[in-house]
Amino acid sequence: DAKTTQPNSMESNEEEPVHLPCNHSTISGTDYIHWYRQLPSQGPEYVIHGLTSNVNNRMASLAIAEDRKSSTLILHRATLRDAAVYYCLSAGGTSYGKLTFGQGTILTVHP
Amino acid sequence: KAGVTQTPRYLIKTRGQQVTLSCSPISGHRSVSWYQQTPGQGLQFLFEYFSETQRNKGNFPGRFSGRQFSNSRSEMNVSTLELGDSALYLCASSLVVLGDTEAFFGQGTRLTVV
């Protein structure tokens, strides 16, 4: 399984952009990069995923490095509701059928 | 459409007992996976089922087992409960095998072993 490395915590102010980094240097060529977030007392929630190209959806953007060894989740305008633990992980390919969660990044959003 | 439903939401059991947890995936989803979440170990993969077949298993003792029915509903069973089995058990469903598709998680079952 590809190992991911994320900062333990990050802070942001409301309505400012947030860039959450992730290193996944051992990812294989067929593994997709996924991001999930978990709010207190809830199950993880899907945020975004991609393989090689940058991806956008209504929640966030995912910027994937050309060598695929790192990626960045971008929240364009953080809100208080975005305060959560954000997990970067790989799925598919060598991670067939499962998601391998790391410790994640605790995002704090200040009003 | 309805999300992933896990029952019960909360459960208190005594050491040595066994427990069965249930997961109803999103309609049409064929893959169901289970995770254990504890403060010390974080989220850990238990097993994954697709079309009633277990295709992947995490590093847990044989006391942890599961199955999937023809309607894709899944159950996991823990026998001879230990205090360390106290955790939030999460179920996730996806349309097909995880990769270029997202997983949808339920709210979890909070198991407390006393």
Image (spheres, rainbow, N blue to C red):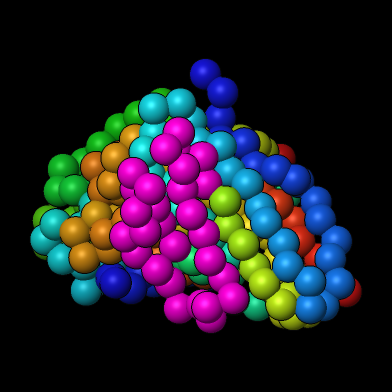
Q: Is residue B34 magenta?
A: no
Examine the rendering and report whether any part of residue B34 can be seen: yes
Residue A69 location, quadrant = bottom left
| Residue at image coords 82%, 77% | B15
Q: Which residues are magenta?
A: B47-74
Q: Is residue B83 above or below residue A62?
A: below
| Residue at image coords 36%, 69% | A4
Q: Is residue B77 above or below residue B28?
A: below
Give the residue at the far top of this rendering: B1
Asked if residue A84 lies left or right of residue A64, the reply is right
| Residue at image coords 64%, 68% | B78
Residue B7 location, quadrant = top right
| Residue at image coords 39%, 52% | B49
Looking at the figure, which quarter contains the N terminus of chain A?
bottom left
Residue A83, given in percent of the width and then of the height, sits at 63, 46
Residue B42 location, quadrant = bottom right
Between A72 and A46, which is closer to the camera in this rendering? A46
Residue B100, given in percent of the width and then of the height, sits at 24, 42
Residue B11, given in percent of the width and then of the height, sits at 81, 56
Residue A86, given in percent of the width and then of the height, sits at 51, 54
Examine the rendering and report whether any part of residue A14 can be seen: no
Circle count = 0
Between A3 and A111, which is closer to the camera in this rendering? A3
Asked if residue A74 lies left or right of residue A14, the reply is left
Q: Is residue B54 magenta?
A: yes
Asked if residue A18 lies left or right of residue A111, the reply is left
Between A29 and B103, which is closer to the camera in this rendering? B103
Looking at the figure, which quarter contains the C terminus of chain A?
top right
Asked if residue B74 lies left or right of residue A5, the reply is right
